[in-house]
Image (spheres, grey):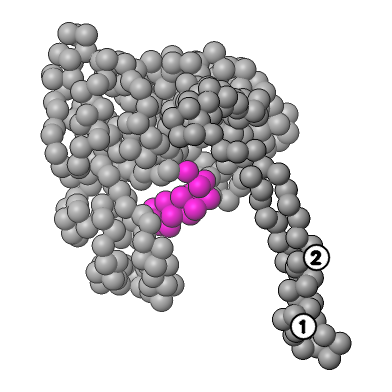
Amino acid sequence: MYLLVFPLRHRATATGGRADETSTTDSLNQALELVPVPPLPSSTAGRRRRANHTVHSPLTLRRRGEKEVERERMVFGQVVIGPPGSGKTTYCNGMSQFLQLIGRKVAVVNLDPANDMLPYECAANIEELIKLSDVMMEHSLGPNGGLVYCMDYLEKNIDWLESKLKPLLKDHYLLFDFPGQVELFFLHSNAKRVIDKLVKKLNLRLTAVHLIDSHLCSDPGKYISALLLSLSTMLHLELPHINVLSKIDLIESYGKLAFNLDFYMDVQDLSYLQHHLDQDPRSAKYRKLTKELCDVIEDYSLVNFTTLDIQDKESVGNLVKLIDKSNGFIFAGMEPSAVEFSKIAIGPEGGEVVTCIRWKLRVCRV
């Protein structure tokens, strides 16, 4: 059996026109080659023979092995950020307890060098590497400058943090408690580079949980500032992102809201806030600027909020479902004690609601 090979050539005449058909045919006939090709095997025997002689290159086998190892070592977690006083440390403490209740092994990593009173047990603490008080004293820096210096120092000594995290990668869910200085997450790049290095080197699947104190909803100007902060942080970190109105159980103590809570959660038409802003003499002066900022927020159409009462297990459970959807945890293998939780997480929002008593019973039975 022979395979006919026709090397195609395009030849032009001296005048720039097409070559005549006769000369082209002659050229092809002269270039015709007969290349021997082994006969194809018969249908049944050939398929069996090809299956038995299938050979994978070492590169293919290595890539398959790397993908399998990658699936086995996939680690999930949360990057907890937010302004000072938004409840980050309390959140990490409550969230770690809830996750342990549903059967996950949790490791909390404190990366706030100014937080020296921790209600939870740390798997890694940045104060073992550097302390804010020492930086301020040695370099004559204030709190803000000292925190920027600490994040820069952590970035340059990222190997220390990696060595602390590697023993936890096999079976732990990670919570990173970051400082409350907002400039670190929408202005400076040190914290972002730290997160990026951990994601790439340790194969982490992280979701940014951005906490905003719900009392800001009671002041239209502060609420718009919170929206700008949330939008800037989302664009800067480039992570799956969930904005949370924390301390929602205390929102009624700050006075009656101008609109219902859904308005602030869904970030609906912000022009309705303009009337309330005009009633404040300080805000009325910057009315045009405020309108332009609101237009920017609405043009991006990225910001919305969910609510959280860290003392309410149902509220925490709803938030965990959103986080698991965002970082892909619902697609990974989980402990038997969390099977029921995963089924609910996959379901549509607004579906089944499980109270803390049912959660506890499921864990006890396992």
Q: Secondary structure at mark 1?
A: loop
Q: Where is mark 2, residue-wise? A: 30
- Judge by depth and name the residue closer to the eye, 351 or 150: 351
Residue sitting at x 24%, y 21%:
339
- Judge by depth and name the residue closer to the eye, 9 or 61: 9
The span shown in magenta is 225-239
Left or right of residue 218, residue 55 in this image = right
Q: Position of residue 128 (x, y in %)?
A: 61, 17
Q: State the residue lying farthest toward the bottom.
A: 15
Mark 1 surroundings: few (<14), some (14-19) or many (≥20) residues within 10 A = some
Magenta stretch, overall SS: helix
Whole-Å distance between the Cαs marked 1 and 2?
A: 16 Å
Q: Where is mark 1, residue-wise? A: 19
Q: Quadrant of the C terminus?
A: top left
- Judge by depth and name the residue closer to the eye, 153 or 355: 355
Residue sitting at x 50%, y 30%:
46
Left or right of residue 164, residue 348 in this image = left
Q: Position of residue 276 (x, y in %)?
A: 26, 67
Asked if one can make out residue 118 in the rendered structure from this viewpoint, the answer is no
Quick check: is 236 in the magenta stretch? Answer: yes
Quick check: is 213 in the magenta stretch? Answer: no
Q: Position of residue 338 (x, y in %)?
A: 26, 20
Disc 1 or 2, which lies upstream in sequence? 1
- Judge by depth and name the residue closer to the eye, 136 or 243: 243
